[in-house]
Every structure is written in structure tokens, then in C-alpha cells.
Image (spheres, rainbow, N blue to C red):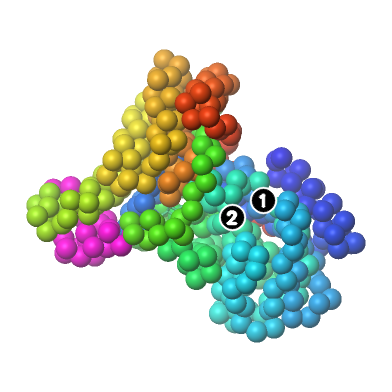
Amino acid sequence: MNLKELAAHVTVEFQKHYGRPPRWIVAAPGRVNVIGEHTDYNDGFVLPMAIERYAVMAADAADTPGQVNVYDTHFKESATIDISAPVTKGQPKWSNYIRGVFAGFQNRGVTIPALDVAFMSTVPLGGGLSSSAALEVCTATLMEAATGKAIDPIEKALLAQKAEHDFAGVPCGIMDQFISALGREGHLLLLDCRTRKTQLVPMSDPSVALLVINTNVKHELSGGEYAERRAQCEEAARNIGVKSLRDCTADQLDQAKGKLSEVVYRRARHVIGEIERTTHAAEGIRQSNWPTVGQFMYASHYALRDDYEVSCKELDVVVEIAEDIGYQGGVYGCRMTGGGFGGCCVALVKADCVNAITKKIAADYKAKTGIDAAIFASRPAAGATIIKG
Ligand code: GLA
């Protein structure tokens, strides 16, 4: 479903559930990170793009004072959120992303209006495509529509990130919420996570496409591995004597090797290499130097697999299949994307080979793992929008 169809769908669902048409419709996209993995919480660079998969909400003022009613049109499940006091965690689990954003607005002194909301998302859940950031940023955008007050998109992204920290228990970096809030159609976003300065990198060459390959192995970032990696990076920076790994060169790391455990050394080696790969890859994209960009993507995957150890068998299988298809078959590069431990790979491919590559990856992946992959191409989409407001 494209965004227009999705908006129409959620409008019908709102009407069916609440018996009147919605007053506001808002959307926020998921993302795929082209390169720059596990660098955001190290003050490094990331290069994500918003994808044509969205969280969408239709809403209207409600006659239930002190209460927001949210209806999930896909799972046909409702949440009632008490907004008469500081919003707290609650059930169902997915409502915490929404609750966290409401709490963020309350902290800014905003009174949450009573609302009826219907929502739907086409961002695969637990697929490493930021379904949670999409839902958070979508909620924040609904608040902007319903209060008539826009907030600075960077503050909006930070508010959504805090919701993830405090209400979902994932100490994530800033990438996902940033790209969902600030994405631009036809562009990747090169984000300096230290200064929070962004540069738009055009990605409009019709001869290439980005394929998202969902291994359909679910990832769960609150499981502790993510927090552990983050802590290891902080340990590395502390022992090297820098503020963050952004401030450390490969040479400095090697000089400090004796001060680090073997594992922490490898974690830092990934991060330092990845920050460099990301800015080089952005340059390669600007120059439409696709083979070079592809090589950086493969190098990123190997480091995530061997040094950072956040890949898994299924992600590695996808990358191996992509390598087998190779440049001759139209694949420039491929890597795992997002937090890891399952979820998706992203591949840079020749546009006229998309169908053949999709078929080949699907067939080989099924043969090697017994699992059906879900594969789709996406152009870089726009960030959060008020569709009706
Ligand atoms: C998750 C987090 C992001 C980022 C990536 C890894 O998606 O939410 O902040 O750290 O993992 O690059």
C-alpha cells in the first residue's frame, strides 16, 4: 500500500470503529540504514533513508475526558491511555511507544487532548526497519496536528528517542527517530550524530535500487546485547582516554590495544572503521560510484559479523547469496542493517536486475534456511507528514 492508499485505509477503519470521519491523518516512515551501523551512540555518522513503509494514524477529538483511545486496525486491539495525570507505562506493550511520546509532550508543558485514534503500520515489526521509531514519530506528529503547534523536527526526534529509552527500555541512538522525522524524498540523510547536523545526499540515479531483504528472523533489542555493545564502546573510549570513539583514529586504537580486552578492542575497531566507511560511502553515492559504495557495504557487514558480533546466520546467508550473484548479476553490495541479531539486509543493486535478484535471493535463502524472506525495493521516502490537518 502506498501512503495515499494507507491513509484511505486508516480513514475507513477509523470511520468503522468510531462512527465518524477522522479530523487528522498523519504518517511517519520506517527506515533502512544504508551504512553507519552502531555508530550513532558513538557520536559517529549514519546514512539512513526513510522507506515507503509507514505508521499512519487517523484521529479526532474524543468525548472521553482524560483519555486517549487507540485502536490498532491490524491486530484489532485497543489501548486506553490515561492522560489526566503524568502518562505511565501500561498495556498493551505497543502502547508504550505512544505513551512515551505523550509523556515527552507533558514534560514540555503540553496538555494532551482527549483523542480517538486508529492506527496501522506497514513497517514490519521487529524487522530492524524502525517500526518503533515510526510509531513514536507518528504519535509526535499527531500531537503537532492536534495541538496546532509544530515543534522543531530535531527536538521531535529527541523526544521520540527518549520515549524509546524510558518506555521501551532500549538505550538506542538517535538515527531512527531522526530519519523518520527528517527524511526527504529522493535523498539519504548523512547525519553527524555528534553535532546533529544533517546533509541530504541525493539518491536519484535511476540505474540503481536499494533492496530490503527481511530474513524474517525477529530481532529484539531490549534483550541486553544492544546495551552491552554500547557499554563496551564506552569502556573502550574511557580506556583510550577519548570522549567517544568518534575522537579515536585507527592508529590511536592500535596504540591503546594493550589497555583493552580483546573483545572491547574488536568492538572499537568496528566503530572506528564504520564511521570512516560511512563518510566515504556518502561521497561515493554523490559521485554515483556504485561499485565503491558496494564494497563499503560488504566491509561494513564483515566488521559487524566478525568484530561487533551482531549478525546472525540468516543475515550472513543473505550476504553470501548476494556475493554469489555478484557484480555480474547486478549486485554492488549487501549488508545487514539496523541493530542486528535478525531483521533485514540492504543490498545496492542495478535497477534492471531487481526482479532477477529478488527471485534468486528468495529461492536460495529458502533452500539454505527453510525460511521465506520478504524482499522489496524502496525509493527514499519523505519523513513524517501531516496528511490531513
Ligand atoms: C538500532 C538503534 C539505532 C542504532 C542501530 C544500530 O536501530 O535504534 O539507534 O544504534 O540500532 O546502528
| Type of amino acid under label 2 | Ala
**In the rendered image, is residue 184 in sight?**
no
Which residues fall within the magenta stretch?
Answer: 230-252
Residues at marks 1 and 2, CA–CA distance in whole angstroms: 8 Å
**Seen in the image, is 56 located left or right of residue 104?**
right
**Seen in the image, is 200 located left or right of residue 281?**
right
- Name the quarter where the C terminus is drawn: bottom right
Callout 1–callout 2 Cβ contact below 8 Å: yes
Is disc 2 placed on a helix, strand or loop? Answer: helix
| Type of amino acid under label 1 | Ser
- Name the quarter where the N terminus is drawn: top right
Pointer 2 residue = 134
Q: Which mark is residue 121?
A: 1
Whether disc 2's CB lies below 8 Å from ligand 1 is answered: no
Q: How many other residues sit within 10 Å of disc 1, few (<14), some (14-19) or many (≥20)?
A: many
Is disc 1 placed on a helix, strand or loop? Answer: strand
Q: Residue at x 70, y 41 (%)?
A: 2
Q: Residue at x 52, y 46 (%)?
A: 218
**In the rendered image, is residue 237 in sight?**
yes
Q: Is residue 148 magenta?
A: no
* x and y, in percent, of residue 136 in the image: 59, 61
* x and y, in percent, of residue 33 in the image: 46, 44
Residue at the top extreme?
A: 328
Whichever of callouts 1 and 2 sits on the residue coming sooner in the sequence is 1
* x and y, in percent, of residue 375 in the image: 57, 32
Q: Is residue 244 magenta?
A: yes
Q: Residue at x 45, y 16 (%)?
A: 329
Question: Viewer-proximal residue, 230 or 385?
Answer: 230
* x and y, in percent, of residue 367 in the image: 51, 23
Please tell me in which quadrant of the rendered image residue 195 appears: bottom left
**Seen in the image, is 307 located left or right of residue 289?**
left
